[in-house]
Image (cartoon, helix red, strand yellow):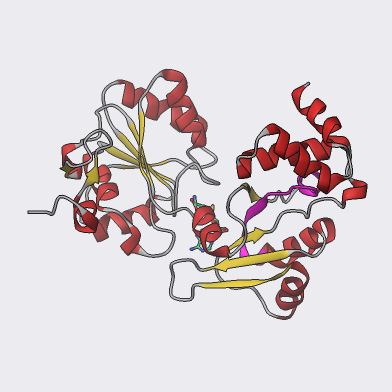
Amino acid sequence: MCEKSGLKAQEAGYLEAREPEEIRRPEQRPFPKGCLIVVGTPIGNLEDFSPRAAEALRQADFIAAEDTRVTRKLLSHLGIHKPLISYYEHNKREKGEWICAKMESGETCALVSDAGMPAISDPGEMLVAQCAQRGIPVTVAPGPSAVITALAISGLPTGRFTFEGFLSVNKKSRREHLEEIRGERRTMVFYEAPHKLTATLKDLLAVLGDRRIALARELTKLHEEVIRTTLKEAVQRFTEEAPRGEFVLVIEGAPAPEPDTMTLEQAVETAVRLQEEEGLSLSEAAKRAAAQSGFKKGEIYRALTR
Ligand code: SAM
């Protein structure tokens, strides 16, 4: 018997919001038939695969996998035998149609990628959109995602952040992306492959200037490491030593503009941010933004209420 409160109870099942005292076991909440289940898989440590995610794979009629060889290993570790179909970047449009037709005929599909959450810098985004469009139910058995895992242990502000994914290898799109984020005040998270890491760090330094960066490497694996440094030092380090393993880059946002160089628009943005982040009243936020920008409180207040 599980206890009705405390960690043990939570481990055994989940807490129903409307009945906080009641503990239900996961198997009491089956996945609906004829739906898509987005299943998160570990980003490096098999122990992170949840029992509920395993249940999702068991209940599915078939599994759409980014790389069937990778998923076959996971299934054999779990002792699960299910038909596998490959769903990846270059076949996602036609395969998506085929998968949707199967689900419309009542079959349940579990979607997995090689690692982490499908649809996050991985195939699946289009399939979920297709389901949404066709009214096919979509549910989730969530698992780790490198972006959130890295952010959580970066030591950089986590209150507001942007996920930038991979920078394009196309020069023009890459430059446009970098220009777009030059003044970004929120913490930014990037994915990068090891062989492109040094070039990317150099580009980031050239456009963003020297900033704090946390390089989260080999998360959840044997050689997990968080390198908390600056962009300049990171460039120097990875020019001398070849990057190894998988990396997530977490970079601090741009500093607030100097008061005397702030435009009225920036002062208003500051007031809005203070309202959102610190829950200040309109008047108090305008006052604080005035102190930071050099504009009069009334000017900011008027612009805020216009
Ligand atoms: N869908 C995955 C997710 O939810 O995290 C991301 C897949 S994306 C194709 C792969 C990138 O994620 C890698 O290039 C790396 O930047 C990051 N990544 C994945 N696993 C990681 C790990 N264990 N440690 C550090 N970065 C990782």
Point 79% across, 51% down: residue = 256
Point 76% across, 37% down: residue = 286
Tally the numbered discs: 0
Q: Is residue 8 above or below residue 110?
A: below
Q: Horizontal placement of 229 versus 114: left or right?
A: right
Q: Horizontal placement of 10 versus 169: left or right?
A: left
Is 183 a magenta residue? yes
Is 296 a magenta residue? no
Point 29% across, 54% down: residue = 50
Q: Is residue 217 above or below residue 289?
A: below
Q: Quadrant of residue 44?
A: bottom left
Q: Is residue 276 above or below residue 67?
A: above
Percent x, y for residue 244?
A: 59, 73
In this rendered view, identify the residue nearer to me: 70 or 145. 145
Q: Which residues are magenta?
A: 176-195
Q: Horizontal placement of 223 versus 227: left or right?
A: left
Point 45% across, 24% down: residue = 132
Q: Is residue 235 above or below residue 50?
A: below
Percent x, y for residue 58?
A: 22, 44
Q: Residue furthest top?
A: 134
Q: Quadrant of residue 85?
A: top left
Percent x, y for residue 164?
A: 65, 48
Percent x, y for residue 191?
A: 61, 56
In this rendered view, identify the residue nearer to me: 185 or 122. 185
